[in-house]
Amino acid sequence: MNPEFLVERLIAAGLIILISFPLHEFSHALAAYRLGDGTAKLFGRLTLNPIAHFDPLGGILLIVSSLAGFGIGWAKPTPVNPANLQGGRNGDAIVAMAGPVSNLVIAAAVAIPLRYIEATGMEIPVQILNLLALFVFINIALFLFNLLPVVPLDGSHVLFALMSPSTEFRYRPVLTQYGPIILLAAAFLPILPGGNTIFGAVLGALGDPIFELLVGRGFFFWT
């Protein structure tokens, strides 16, 4: 791997740990607090302080896996008591959605300077451009990945909210038991044509168009 690209990946991993993960978890905590559950605040998670949300294993794994050319990691899960939430299962879905949406907001915010650079022709080192673009794309990937309707991801809470109570009661134990296995298969098993994974297909079908919408076609001439 190109050493410069490796450095860009490591810096991007640091930005994820310092910005994306904390804002994601803070958004969960804030949504829960606004809907009546103060559990996250009680545990000191209603903050943007990266230390409060840092998971040692998830953070170290993200850095190490970035060295290998891909990124896998996580922050400390935000504690939420669904019984305290206004709106019941709908409230739980809103809290779950808040995290991934925050990653999409980050991607859109970082894309603004890239759009400005493209529009003005400003001369910026290609390393900085690539780093910003990589940060945008990673946050889009976090948005899409966390919305997969698989336990324990945020998308599973949305899935359960869309089910009738009886259907949820029937399928939730099974999906909870086998969710991690399904998740690993979706993320890593090349079961689709061309050796693609399920998440790789989702990222290609949705992630690329979102990236192009936010950053614009012109950026690809710089990469």
Image (tube, helix red, strand yellow):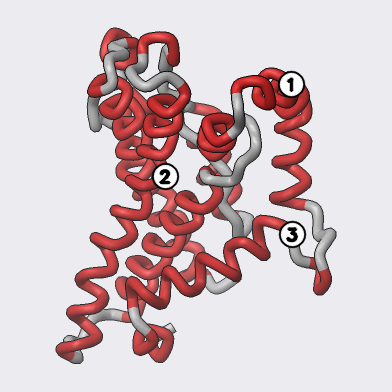
Q: Nearer the viewer, residue 142 or 70?
A: 142
User: On residue 170, which mark appears?
Assistant: 1
On the image, numbered disc 3 is attached to which residue? Answer: 197
Q: Earlier in the sequence, mark 2 or mark 1?
A: 2
How much space separates mark 2 and mark 3, taking CA atoms?
A: 21 Å
Q: Nearer the viewer, residue 200 or 51?
A: 200
Residue type at tag 1: Arg
Q: Residue at x 84, y 59 (%)?
A: 191
**At numbered mark 2, what does the secondary structure look like: helix, strand or loop?**
helix
**Drawn side of residue 93 relative to residue 125, left or right:** right
User: On residue 219, which mark appears?
Assistant: none
Residue type at tag 2: Pro
x and y percentages locating residue 206 in the rendered image: 53, 66
Q: Residue at x 72, y 57 (%)?
A: 198
How much space separates mark 2 and mark 1, taking CA atoms?
A: 27 Å
Q: Are marks 2 and 1 in contact (CB under 8 Å)?
A: no
| Up-down relation of residue 115 to residue 85 (above or below) | below
On the image, numbered disc 2 is attached to which residue? Answer: 100
